[in-house]
Image (cartoon, rainbow, N blue to C red):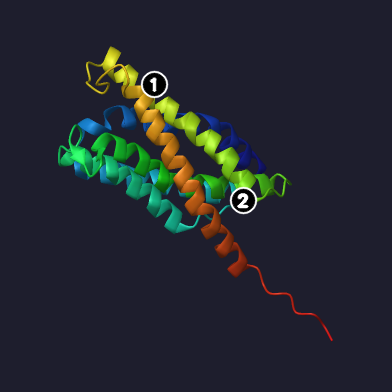
Amino acid sequence: MQQTTSITRKLELPLVLLVTIAGAGFLLKMCYLSLVFNCLFGLLFLAAFYAYVRGRHGIDIPLVLLALVFAALQVDALGNFFRMYGRQFGPLQYDEFSHMAVQVLITPLLIWLVRRGMNRLGHNVSIGLAALLAGTIMFSLTACYEIIELWDEVYFGGQRIWGKYDTANDLQWDLCGIIIGSFVAIPLLRLTEEKRTPAFSPQI
Protein backbone atom coordinates (compact mmCIF):
# COMPACT_ATOMS: atom_id res chain seq x y z
CA MET A 1 0.00 0.00 0.00
CA GLN A 2 2.80 2.38 0.94
CA GLN A 3 4.68 1.48 -2.26
CA THR A 4 1.55 2.21 -4.35
CA THR A 5 1.17 5.59 -2.66
CA SER A 6 4.83 6.38 -3.35
CA ILE A 7 4.46 5.51 -7.05
CA THR A 8 1.28 7.59 -7.28
CA ARG A 9 2.99 10.63 -5.79
CA LYS A 10 5.94 10.23 -8.16
CA LEU A 11 3.55 10.20 -11.11
CA GLU A 12 1.54 13.14 -9.77
CA LEU A 13 3.82 15.97 -10.94
CA PRO A 14 4.27 14.61 -14.51
CA LEU A 15 0.50 14.10 -14.81
CA VAL A 16 -0.25 17.60 -13.52
CA LEU A 17 2.29 19.04 -15.98
CA LEU A 18 0.76 16.99 -18.80
CA VAL A 19 -2.74 18.22 -18.01
CA THR A 20 -1.47 21.80 -17.76
CA ILE A 21 0.19 21.52 -21.17
CA ALA A 22 -3.00 20.01 -22.59
CA GLY A 23 -4.97 22.94 -21.18
CA ALA A 24 -2.53 25.45 -22.70
CA GLY A 25 -2.73 23.62 -26.04
CA PHE A 26 -6.52 23.75 -25.86
CA LEU A 27 -6.46 27.51 -25.25
CA LEU A 28 -4.03 27.89 -28.15
CA LYS A 29 -6.40 26.25 -30.62
CA MET A 30 -9.80 26.66 -28.98
CA CYS A 31 -10.97 29.41 -31.31
CA TYR A 32 -10.39 27.15 -34.34
CA LEU A 33 -12.15 24.06 -32.94
CA SER A 34 -15.77 23.00 -33.17
CA LEU A 35 -18.31 23.93 -30.53
CA VAL A 36 -18.94 20.25 -29.71
CA PHE A 37 -15.23 19.54 -29.17
CA ASN A 38 -14.85 22.64 -26.99
CA CYS A 39 -17.80 21.58 -24.83
CA LEU A 40 -16.57 18.00 -24.44
CA PHE A 41 -12.98 19.00 -23.70
CA GLY A 42 -14.16 21.60 -21.19
CA LEU A 43 -16.30 19.03 -19.38
CA LEU A 44 -13.52 16.43 -19.32
CA PHE A 45 -10.91 18.94 -18.15
CA LEU A 46 -13.12 20.24 -15.34
CA ALA A 47 -14.05 16.69 -14.32
CA ALA A 48 -10.35 15.75 -14.13
CA PHE A 49 -9.60 18.89 -12.11
CA TYR A 50 -12.49 18.15 -9.71
CA ALA A 51 -11.41 14.51 -9.30
CA TYR A 52 -7.78 15.48 -8.65
CA VAL A 53 -8.57 18.16 -6.07
CA ARG A 54 -11.04 15.88 -4.31
CA GLY A 55 -8.95 12.72 -4.44
CA ARG A 56 -5.53 14.23 -3.72
CA HIS A 57 -6.42 17.07 -1.37
CA GLY A 58 -9.83 16.05 -0.01
CA ILE A 59 -11.48 19.28 -1.20
CA ASP A 60 -15.04 19.10 -2.56
CA ILE A 61 -15.43 21.99 -4.98
CA PRO A 62 -19.04 23.24 -5.15
CA LEU A 63 -20.42 22.15 -8.50
CA VAL A 64 -22.03 25.54 -9.05
CA LEU A 65 -18.57 27.13 -9.15
CA LEU A 66 -17.40 24.58 -11.73
CA ALA A 67 -20.55 25.30 -13.73
CA LEU A 68 -19.57 28.98 -13.80
CA VAL A 69 -16.15 28.05 -15.20
CA PHE A 70 -17.82 25.90 -17.86
CA ALA A 71 -20.08 28.85 -18.72
CA ALA A 72 -16.95 31.01 -19.06
CA LEU A 73 -15.55 28.58 -21.64
CA GLN A 74 -18.82 28.75 -23.54
CA VAL A 75 -18.69 32.55 -23.73
CA ASP A 76 -15.59 32.20 -25.89
CA ALA A 77 -16.72 29.06 -27.74
CA LEU A 78 -20.11 30.52 -28.66
CA GLY A 79 -18.50 33.77 -29.71
CA ASN A 80 -16.33 31.85 -32.17
CA PHE A 81 -19.21 29.64 -33.32
CA PHE A 82 -21.45 32.60 -34.15
CA ARG A 83 -18.50 34.67 -35.45
CA MET A 84 -19.13 37.42 -32.90
CA TYR A 85 -15.50 38.48 -32.53
CA GLY A 86 -14.89 41.78 -34.28
CA ARG A 87 -18.57 42.74 -33.90
CA GLN A 88 -20.35 45.13 -31.60
CA PHE A 89 -22.04 43.54 -28.57
CA GLY A 90 -24.06 46.20 -26.80
CA PRO A 91 -21.75 49.06 -25.80
CA LEU A 92 -18.65 46.83 -26.16
CA GLN A 93 -16.90 44.82 -28.81
CA TYR A 94 -17.58 41.11 -28.28
CA ASP A 95 -13.87 40.57 -27.59
CA GLU A 96 -14.05 43.09 -24.74
CA PHE A 97 -17.26 41.56 -23.39
CA SER A 98 -15.74 38.07 -23.59
CA HIS A 99 -12.60 38.99 -21.65
CA MET A 100 -14.64 40.68 -18.94
CA ALA A 101 -17.36 38.01 -18.68
CA VAL A 102 -14.89 35.13 -18.49
CA GLN A 103 -13.12 36.70 -15.51
CA VAL A 104 -16.42 37.47 -13.76
CA LEU A 105 -17.40 33.80 -14.04
CA ILE A 106 -14.04 32.26 -13.07
CA THR A 107 -13.04 34.56 -10.19
CA PRO A 108 -15.52 33.12 -7.61
CA LEU A 109 -14.01 29.63 -7.95
CA LEU A 110 -10.48 30.94 -7.56
CA ILE A 111 -11.39 32.94 -4.45
CA TRP A 112 -13.01 29.84 -2.95
CA LEU A 113 -9.99 27.66 -3.78
CA VAL A 114 -7.47 30.17 -2.42
CA ARG A 115 -9.34 30.49 0.87
CA ARG A 116 -9.84 26.75 1.24
CA GLY A 117 -6.19 26.09 0.39
CA MET A 118 -4.95 28.69 2.88
CA ASN A 119 -7.22 27.25 5.57
CA ARG A 120 -5.81 23.77 4.97
CA LEU A 121 -2.31 25.20 5.42
CA GLY A 122 -3.35 26.59 8.79
CA HIS A 123 -3.90 30.21 7.70
CA ASN A 124 -7.41 31.38 8.53
CA VAL A 125 -7.63 34.24 6.04
CA SER A 126 -10.68 36.39 5.45
CA ILE A 127 -12.67 36.21 2.22
CA GLY A 128 -11.46 39.72 1.40
CA LEU A 129 -7.79 38.73 1.64
CA ALA A 130 -8.49 35.55 -0.32
CA ALA A 131 -10.10 37.71 -3.01
CA LEU A 132 -7.00 39.92 -3.17
CA LEU A 133 -4.70 36.90 -3.53
CA ALA A 134 -7.03 35.27 -6.06
CA GLY A 135 -7.21 38.51 -8.05
CA THR A 136 -3.44 38.68 -8.42
CA ILE A 137 -3.30 35.01 -9.46
CA MET A 138 -6.16 35.52 -11.90
CA PHE A 139 -4.53 38.54 -13.51
CA SER A 140 -1.29 36.57 -13.88
CA LEU A 141 -3.23 33.80 -15.64
CA THR A 142 -4.82 36.31 -18.02
CA ALA A 143 -1.33 37.58 -18.86
CA CYS A 144 -0.33 33.98 -19.62
CA TYR A 145 -3.31 33.72 -21.97
CA GLU A 146 -2.14 36.83 -23.82
CA ILE A 147 1.26 35.13 -24.24
CA ILE A 148 -0.56 32.11 -25.71
CA GLU A 149 -2.26 34.45 -28.19
CA LEU A 150 1.17 35.86 -29.09
CA TRP A 151 2.54 32.34 -29.66
CA ASP A 152 -0.40 31.57 -31.96
CA GLU A 153 0.24 34.77 -33.88
CA VAL A 154 4.03 34.41 -34.17
CA TYR A 155 4.59 30.64 -34.43
CA PHE A 156 1.35 29.08 -35.70
CA GLY A 157 0.07 31.60 -38.23
CA GLY A 158 -3.02 32.56 -36.26
CA GLN A 159 -4.76 35.92 -36.20
CA ARG A 160 -5.43 36.77 -32.56
CA ILE A 161 -3.86 40.22 -32.13
CA TRP A 162 -5.74 42.90 -34.06
CA GLY A 163 -3.68 45.99 -33.32
CA LYS A 164 -1.01 47.52 -31.15
CA TYR A 165 -3.49 48.16 -28.33
CA ASP A 166 -5.23 44.76 -28.50
CA THR A 167 -3.27 43.05 -25.71
CA ALA A 168 -3.43 46.04 -23.37
CA ASN A 169 -7.15 46.44 -24.07
CA ASP A 170 -7.76 42.74 -23.36
CA LEU A 171 -5.93 43.00 -20.05
CA GLN A 172 -7.93 46.11 -19.17
CA TRP A 173 -11.22 44.24 -19.57
CA ASP A 174 -9.77 41.20 -17.81
CA LEU A 175 -9.00 43.42 -14.81
CA CYS A 176 -12.52 44.87 -14.89
CA GLY A 177 -13.95 41.35 -14.89
CA ILE A 178 -11.78 40.28 -11.95
CA ILE A 179 -12.87 43.30 -9.92
CA ILE A 180 -16.56 42.79 -10.75
CA GLY A 181 -16.29 39.04 -10.09
CA SER A 182 -14.70 39.72 -6.70
CA PHE A 183 -17.37 42.22 -5.65
CA VAL A 184 -20.07 39.73 -6.65
CA ALA A 185 -18.37 36.67 -5.14
CA ILE A 186 -17.37 38.08 -1.73
CA PRO A 187 -20.92 38.70 -0.37
CA LEU A 188 -22.24 35.48 -1.93
CA LEU A 189 -19.44 33.38 -0.41
CA ARG A 190 -19.94 35.10 2.95
CA LEU A 191 -23.67 34.35 2.79
CA THR A 192 -22.99 30.71 1.93
CA GLU A 193 -20.50 30.46 4.78
CA GLU A 194 -22.98 31.93 7.26
CA LYS A 195 -25.63 29.42 6.22
CA ARG A 196 -23.23 26.52 6.73
CA THR A 197 -22.06 27.76 10.14
CA PRO A 198 -24.37 26.46 12.85
CA ALA A 199 -25.95 29.11 15.01
CA PHE A 200 -24.57 29.43 18.55
CA SER A 201 -26.98 28.16 21.13
CA PRO A 202 -26.04 29.21 24.68
CA GLN A 203 -26.58 26.49 27.24
CA ILE A 204 -28.82 27.39 30.12
User: Crowding at label 1, few (<14), some or many (≥20) Cα neighbours within 10 Å?
Assistant: some
Q: Residue at point 75% right, 79% down?
A: 201
Return the residue found at the far top: 154
What is the x, y in percent for residue 57?
A: 60, 47
Is residue 185 left or right of 85 when viewed as pictured? right
Viewer-nearest residue: 192 or 184? 184
Give amino acid for label 1: Ile
Q: Which element carries disc 2, helix, strand or loop? A: helix
Occupied quadrant, residue 156: top left
Occupied quadrant, residue 149: top left
Whole-number angstrom distance, CA of label 2 to CA of label 1: 30 Å
- Position of 114 relative to 87 (above/below): below
Q: Residue at point 31% right, 23% down?
A: 166
Viewer-nearest residue: 74 or 13? 74
- The residue beneath circle 2 is 127
* Residue 37 visible at all: no
User: Crowding at label 2, few (<14), some or many (≥20) Cα neighbours within 10 Å?
Assistant: many
Give amino acid for label 2: Ile
What is the x, y in percent for residue 150?
A: 33, 18
Return the residue found at the far left: 82
Occupied quadrant, residue 82: top left
What is the x, y in percent for residue 76?
A: 27, 40
Is residue 144 left or right of 89 when viewed as pictured? right
- The residue beneath circle 1 is 147
Is residue 77 left or right of 170 when viewed as pictured? left
Is residue 181 left or right of 94 when viewed as pictured? right
* Residue 200 visible at all: yes
What is the x, y in percent for residue 144?
A: 43, 26
Point out which mark residue 122 bears: none
Q: Residue at point 51% right, 44% down?
A: 110
